[in-house]
Image (tube, rainbow, N blue to C red):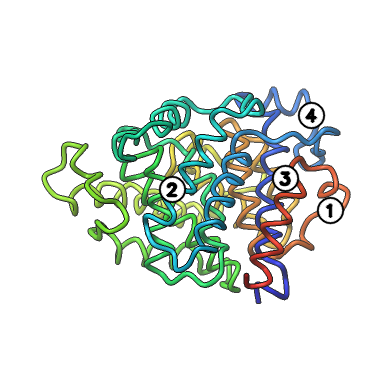
Amino acid sequence: MMRTKQAATGSLIGLALGDALGFPTEFDNVPSILAEHGPWREMELPPKARVSDDTQMTLALGRGLWTAMERGPLVPRSLERPVREEFVNWYHSPDNDRAPGRTCLVACRLLDSDLPWQKASQIGSKGCGANMRVAPVGLAPGLDERQRAGAAQLQAALTHGHPTGLAASDLTARAVHLLAQGAEPAGLVGRLRSYGLESRTRYDERWLGDLWTYADDPTPAHFIARGWDECLAVLERLEAVLRDPSLTSETDPCLATGVGWVAEEALATGLLCFLMFPEDPVTALRRAACTRGDSDSIACLTGAFAGAHLGVAAWPGEWVERVEYRGELEGLGVGWDGGV
């Protein structure tokens, strides 16, 4: 199904479109957004559709993952080295001028050294900077479940070492993968909760090494369970919101599932915007961009989910033509849609 609907291309383009739509509204409240941009259902992509560090880091991860997979079966060391190099290159790039998060900057500065990556990881940070960029792990073909989970958590841990950042990245990659493979949106949250319950105490030392020892947890299982418990709690809240008859499209999604600065809230609110309009992806992006929270990251995730579900045809051609980094996004997507 991925090859037919071009889910990888659709997801990566959707992520960037959400980023470009939400970047100008980040840090604003809803009344201010409406005053400047008009009715949210009519929001238009800016003439110069610039993206934030969210898309830049997604591409960095995508390039690193591509390099690793070209070298053979995906294992921790084969992924860590090229992704680390890509993150450091992003850190030094003159284009790294899009209000990047402090956690990524500090971690990438430390990654630009001979330190083990675990010492660069910001163990106390569960910011959304790890799961807003993880979509490539859910889209790359040929990975088994352990590889996908391990890669999602490792790429997160390079910068955001908090267990909730790891769990949210794993869940985000799994959601993208399931949608790309044809999963129905209506059952998605339930499937993610089941996966979270199964994974709750599973610390994969092969992929994470001794990361857990940098926190104050007594065991690896205790460490990782803290992250899964926070993610399971927000998914339970999301399920309740979706069943609530008082939920309307005019309600700011951040009021229901959080403003998205932290990983589990970005996941839940991005999913909520997608699930409110599963067959109307542009409206979903507009709703995500008109929120009081981390609008670009929320809309990034919404676009990644919607594009994985509906494919590249989901997006207006005129928007696709204008989005920044279009060539790189399509290059990765087309390669993965072709099963490379």
Residue wearing tag 1: 316
Left or right of residue 139: residue 325: right
Left or right of residue 319: residue 249: left
CA–CA distance between discs 1 and 4? Answer: 19 Å
CA–CA distance between discs 2 and 4? Answer: 43 Å
Query: Which percent across, then down, holds residue 170?
Result: 42, 56
Which dot, 2 or 3, sits closer to the camera?
Answer: 2
Does label 3 or label 4 sit earlier along the sequence? 3
Residue wearing tag 2: 81
Query: Which percent across, then down, holds residue 14?
Result: 69, 52
Does label 2 or label 3 sit earlier along the sequence? 3
Q: Contact (CB < 8 A) between labels 1 and 4?
A: no
Query: Which percent across, then down, holds residue 306?
Result: 65, 58
Residue wearing tag 3: 17
Left or right of residue 30: residue 37: right
Query: Which percent across, then down, holds residue 137?
Result: 51, 58
Decide: is 23 above or below 176.
Answer: above
Q: Contact (CB < 8 A) between labels 2 and 1?
A: no
